[in-house]
């Protein structure tokens, strides 16, 4: 009887393992910014996007490896050797180009005038790859202060996106106009930056 029961349950276990990639995509998601790839997951703000491709895993990995080499501010994690189906590294002093998406010097949120540092993880499968960007911090922006007071070192600090875009102890995303614009510009810039279809390495050729 136990043997028969195990046979009946075996397909369920196999399906769960094969679908683990898809399940992990939504597990722990608390909130998201509509129309973007910015989500709040396990009390942390991250960029998470799945791209589709015509290429199988091996060739797709080769193209992504070359794409990452063209991103001047991307650095591989020296402690993790690039694997066939996964790339891990960092964006170091990367600038979000808000003007490319319609912003002006007067409408660009102040925090985007400073460089972004973040952790990048790319997982590759046949015909698709997923980009996850976490630990997003803007380096040394000056906090809003009384203009009559001089800028001091104590007023200069990193801004963590986890705190900047969230409220109520990181349980939900802010819905202010500034917060939404920051999320939209970050999402647009990163979505295009890691998109093979929009790069000179398009998988169409």
Image (cartoon, rainbow, N blue to C red):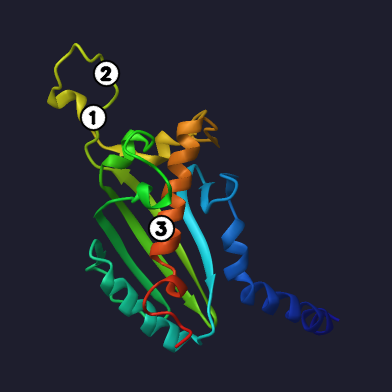
Q: Residue at x 25, y 14 (%)?
A: 146
In the rendering, at what x and y percent does residue 132 appear? 44, 60
In the rendering, at what x and y percent does residue 54 appear? 54, 84
Mark 1 to mark 3 CA distance (whole Å): 24 Å
Q: Residues within 10 Å of mark 2 (few under 14, many from 20)?
A: few
Q: Earlier in the sequence, mark 1 or mark 3?
A: 1
Q: Residues within 10 Å of mark 3 (few under 14, many from 20)?
A: some
In the rendering, at what x and y percent does residue 92 appear? 24, 55
- Quadrant hosting residue 158: top left
Task: Kindly indicate whether the residue at mark 2 contacts the one at mark 1 (C-beta within 8 angstroms).
Answer: yes
| Residue 84 appears in the picture as rendered | no
Which residue is labeled 3 in the image? 190
Q: Residue at x 52, y 70 (%)?
A: 51
| Quadrant containing the C terminus in the rendered view | bottom left
| Quadrant containing the N terminus in the rendered view | bottom right
SS category of the residue bearing label 2: loop
In the image, is 80 to the left or to the right of 102?
A: left
In the image, is 96 to the left or to the right of 25?
A: left
Q: Residue at x 31, y 44 (%)?
A: 137
Mark 1 to mark 2 CA distance (whole Å): 8 Å
SS category of the residue bearing label 3: helix
In the rendering, at what x and y percent does residue 71 appear? 28, 67
Q: Earlier in the sequence, mark 3 or mark 2?
A: 2
Which residue is labeled 2 in the image? 145
């Amino acid at each position: 009887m136990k043997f028969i029961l195990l046979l009946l349950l075996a397909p369920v276990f196999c399906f769960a393992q094969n679908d683990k990639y898809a399940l992990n995509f939504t597990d722990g998601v608390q909130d998201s910014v509509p129309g973007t790839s910015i989500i709040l997951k396990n009390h942390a703000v991250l960029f998470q996007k799945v791209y589709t491709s015509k290429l199988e895993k091996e060739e797709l990995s080769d193209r992504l490896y070359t794409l990452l080499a063209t991103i001047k501010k991307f650095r591989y994690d020296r402690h993790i050797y690039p694997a066939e189906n996964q790339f891990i590294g960092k964006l170091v002093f990367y600038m979000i180009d808000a003007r490319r998406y319609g912003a002006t010097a007067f409408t660009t949120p102040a925090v985007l005038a400073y460089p972004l540092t973040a952790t990048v993880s790319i997982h590759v499968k046949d015909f698709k790859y997923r980009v996850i960007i976490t630990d997003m911090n803007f380096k040394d922006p000056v906090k809003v202060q009384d203009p009559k007071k001089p800028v001091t070192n104590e007023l200069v600090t990193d801004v963590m996106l986890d705190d900047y875009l969230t409220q109520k102890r990181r349980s939900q995303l802010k819905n202010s106009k500034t917060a939404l614009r920051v999320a939209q510009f970050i999402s647009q810039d990163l979505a295009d930056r890691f998109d093979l279809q929009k790069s000179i390495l398009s998988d169409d050729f």
